[in-house]
Every structure is written in C-alpha cells, then in structure tokens.
Image (cartoon, rainbow, N blue to C red):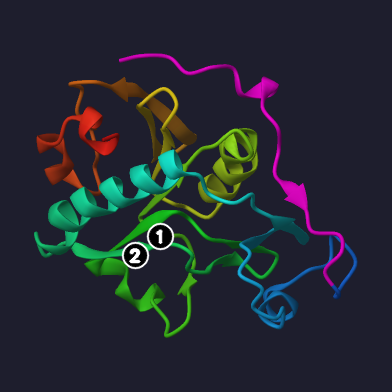
Amino acid sequence: MTTVPDDDSLEIVLLADDIPGPKQGYWTYDAYAAIPDDGKRYEIMDGVLILHPARDIAHQSAVVHVLYYLVQAVELAGLGKVYLGPLDVLLTSARVVQPDVLVVLNANRQKIEEKYIVGGPDLAVEVASLGTAFYDRLSKYEAYEQAGVSEYWIVHPQEKAVEVFVLEDDGYQSLGVFSGKDTLPSRVAPGIADVAVEQFFF
C-alpha cells in the first residue's frame, strides 16, 4: 500500500453561480434536469449547483481501465450492472451526483430507471484530479456514506493508487490505499482481486 497527498492543499470544484435557476442552496433535481445541455458536467450537493472541471488524459485513461475491469468482474460474472458517467444518481432531491463509474448489483436493480439511478449504487468510483480531490474526499464521501453506498473507491491517477472505503454500521472504514502489484479487497466486485492496481494506470 501507499499514501496520497493531503487533500487540504488541493483546489475545490467550482460553484455554478451563473446558471439560471434557483438560488444556490435551493437546487433540486427538477431544476437541474432543465439546464440546457452545454457539454459541461454538473452535480447538486446539498442544494448547491457545482461545475466540474474538464477531465484530463490521466483521468480519462483511469476511468476507461477501471470500467473495463469492473465489467469483467461484475457484468460478465453475472453479479449486476456497471455504468460509465456521466449518469445521474439521485441520492436525494438535493444531492444529484455523477460518479465516474458505478455498480448496481442484481439485488438492487429496482434502483435503475430509464434516465437515472434512484438511491445509492452498491459501488461508486471517483477518479480524483487537482480540481476534485478535496470534494471527492469530503462532500462526496459524506453523501455516499449517508446514502448507504456499500463501497466507495477514490482513484488517484497522479499517485497511481486507489483508496477503498467500505460501509460498516458506524460509517465508512478505509481498507487502505493500494498501488502497484496490490489488489483491491472489494466486497461488491470480488473478482477485481485478480487485477493489480497498476493495471488501472496504463
């Protein structure tokens, strides 16, 4: 296992203050869904509309590789469905997020609607960047924990590492930060144990 830098030094995502709609703090899914498609990625966190920075090459590469291996470990194993963001996940009406990759197991397929996921997925994966690491580690962490997301991975392309959190009775517990030849101790996607973490970062 390895360590990752202190996220307190990293820039947070931007508030989307210039988008016509409710005052910040009062955004809900209905208002969010009415935003014209401008090619940008938005989320709502506690009623606040947030704009995500553009994804860089390292981010996109990590997303593609995580998706590839999760499809093998989950979908091809018959355990559930794997989705690539952007896809709206309605944790609550005032918390709408778009994980980079997410898993819904067969037991929770009723959460899958035509246009979005209702409630927490079984696994949410966020690929951190300089613009999102603080947000992923604090706001998203809390939102996923409170929504009952069983497992949360934060992928760090710069460090080529993955931190794994699992939901226990008293909240999220970190199983550690994994890199190199390490494998991930996933409860949602046990087959991922056949994949070395370094394979996410070609």
Residue 26 pos. (x, y %):
84, 67
> Is 194 in front, or is 86?
86
Magenta-drawn stretch contains 137: no
State the SS at label 1.
Answer: loop
Which residue is labeled 2 in the image?
Answer: 83
- In the image, residue 73 sits, relative to residue 47, either above or below, namely above
Magenta-drawn stretch contains 5: yes
Q: Amino acid at mark 1?
A: Pro
> Is 83 in front, or is 117?
83
Q: Quadrant of residue 96?
A: bottom right
Please report whichever mark, 1 or 2, sits nearer to the chain's N-terminal start. Answer: 2
- In the image, residue 52 sits, relative to residue 187, either above or below, namely below
Residue 46 pos. (x, y %):
74, 56
Image quarter of the N terminus = top left
Report the side of 174 relative to 27 (left or right).
left
Residue 156 pos. (x, y %):
44, 31
Q: Which mark is residue 12?
A: none
Label 2 Cα crowd, 10 Å radius (few <14 / some 14-19 / many 20+): some
Q: Which residues are magenta?
A: 1-19
Which residue is labeled 1 in the image?
Answer: 121
The reply to whether residue 168 is in sight is no
Q: Residue at coordinates 64% horizontally, 52% vertically from top-left?
A: 52
